[in-house]
Image (cartoon, helix red, strand yellow):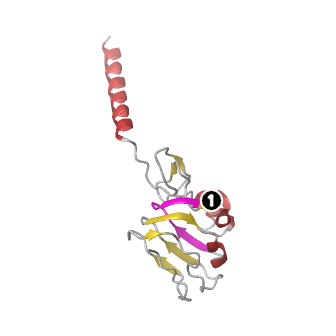
Amino acid sequence: TLPDFSTHQELTTLDLSDNQITGTIPNTLLQSVDTRTKSFLDFSANLLSGTVPASLVGNFDDLTLYLRDNQFEHIDSEVCTVPLYNDGDVALYGCNAILCPVGMYSPVFGRASMKGGNCISCPQSPFMGSSTCEQSSATSHNTKWYFIWVLILSIFALLF
């Protein structure tokens, strides 16, 4: 479970990525930190779920937030209104700058970014913020046979 670190006034950088942390982002996350301080939070590649809470808006004016590869289903829309979030990406991409929606992915950050590109369609992506798009084995198998068939037809056409 993700602790809220609510009494840590000087904590402005927190990297808990790749730790198998479960649960949700607490509404009181770092609530005692000065909101004018630029903060960096990386909770990527855990098992966090639920909603990215609106309370982040009240807690931070300028925030870099990495959440890729978790199990989020929703972002509170207020989080998508702070233009300084994620180095200004929210001003350009809205909620996609926090996490790509379900059914999409972005290879670098799991979100749209000036540094990493847009969110790309991936119907197999069950959660927000995916950084990979895994094709089902049936789709991969069919694609492989399609290319083999095209190759055979191309060779046949060259011979005759």
Q: What residue lies at 57% left-to-right and 66% top-to-bottom?
A: 52
What's drawn in magenta, residue-wise?
Answer: 63-74
Quadrant position of the C terminus in the picture? top left
Observer-nearest residue: 107 or 11?
11
> Magenta: predominant secondary structure element?
strand
Q: Where's residue 40, x and y in %?
A: 53, 75
Quadrant position of the N terminus in the picture? bottom left
Q: Where's residue 140, x and y in %?
A: 36, 38
- Can you say whether 113 is above or below 28 in the image? above
Quarter of the image where one finds residue 29: bottom right
Q: What residue lies at 63% left-to-right and 77% top-to-bottom?
A: 60
Observer-nearest residue: 2 or 57?
2
Task: From the viewer's perspective, tell me whether residue 52 is left or right of residue 81.
Answer: left
Quarter of the image where one finds residue 6: bottom right
Quarter of the image where one finds residue 86: bottom right
Q: What residue lies at 51% left-to-right and 74% top-to-bottom?
A: 41
The residue beneath circle 1 is 95
Q: Is residue 69 magenta?
A: yes
Kindly identify the amino acid type of the residue bearing the numbered disc 1: Cys
Q: Is residue 74 visible?
A: yes
Label 1 crowd (10 A; few <14 / some 14-19 / many >=20): many
